[in-house]
Amino acid sequence: AHIIGGMMSYEFISTSNGINKYRITIRVFRDCQSQGADFDQPAGISIATSEGSYIKTNENFSNPTTSNLTNLFSNPCLVLPPNVCVQEGVYTKIIDLPVINLSYYIIYQRCCRNETLQNIEVPLNTGAVFSVKIEGPALTSCNSSPRYEDWPPIYVCANKPLNYDHSAIDDDGDELIYTLCNPFESGDTAEGRVYPPPPPPFTEIQWGPGYSLNNLLGGPDPLQINSSTGFITGTPI
C-alpha cells in the first residue's frame, strides 16, 4: 500500500570556478495499487553538509518518469501471486555545488512503509530516508557515485535459498565494498512528505521481535552479502 524502497545516485558533469555540476537521480518504488503513497509532485530534496547544516532546503524534483517493473527472479517453485505490481518513479535534476572541505548529503524522506512488514516495528508509521553522500575528496576528483541498473526481486520463494547478484556499477573504476546496514527512519506526516528533510544524524529503524541487522529474515539462514562481489544469500521464511 505504500513505499517499497528506493535509491539515490549522483553523476559528475562538469566543474567551473569552484562550482561542480551534478546530475542527481532518485528512484522510488511503490505498490502500483497504493492509495496512500503516490509519487510526490514535487519530491522535496534538501542538501546538508557533514556538519549537519543546511545548504539548500528547496530543491524540488518534479515529473518523475514512471514504469511498472517485472520480477527478475525465477524459481520453479514460484506460483506468481495475483495483483502483485511494483511501480518505479525516476526523478532527475542537475544541481550546482561549491567545492568545500566538507562532504554533502543529498536527502529525500518519505512516509511510509507497508504495514505488512514483519521485521520493522510499526512500519506504517516508519518513514524512509533516501540519501547519498558526496565525500570531500570526490568533490575535487570529478567523481560519480556507484549505481544500480537492476532492481531486486519483487517476490521470492519462502523457505527456499535466495541467491541474488546485487553488485553495482562504478564508471570511475573505484573499488566497491558492500555491507548490510540498519535502515534510517524519517517521521510520519499527514500528507506523507517530510519537507524539508532534516539533515544528519539520522535515526535508525526499530527492528521487530526476533529480527536484527544480523538476522534480517528471522530464520536460521540469515541474509548475508559478499563484501567484494555484492552477492546476496539467505533463506526467507
Image: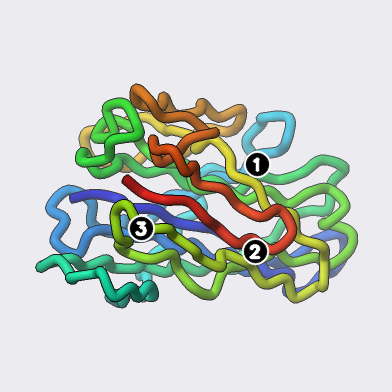
Residue 35 visible in the displayed image? yes
The x, y position of residue 232, in whole percent, is: 55, 57
User: Could you say which quadrant of the image residue 226 lies in?
Assistant: bottom right
Mark drawn on residue 226: none
Q: Residue at x 64, y 60 (%)?
A: 230
What residue sits 19% from the left and 64% below the top?
A: 32
Q: Residues within 10 Å of mark 3 (few under 14, many from 20)?
A: few
Q: Tag 2's secondary structure?
A: strand
Q: Position of residue 37 (x, y in %)?
A: 23, 51
The residue lying at 39 percent from left, 60 percent from top is 28
Could you tell me how far apart the alpha carbons at marks 3 and 2 are, in whole angstroms? 36 Å
Q: Secondary structure at mark 3?
A: loop
Which labelled disc corresponds to residue 160?
Answer: 3
Between the residue at mark 1 and the residue at mark 2, the CA separation in whole angstroms equals 17 Å
* Label 1, residues with CA under 10 Å away: few <14, some 14-19, many ≥20: some
Name the amino acid type tagged 3. Answer: Lys
Q: Which residue is mark 1?
A: 55
Q: For mark 2, what is the residue?
A: 10
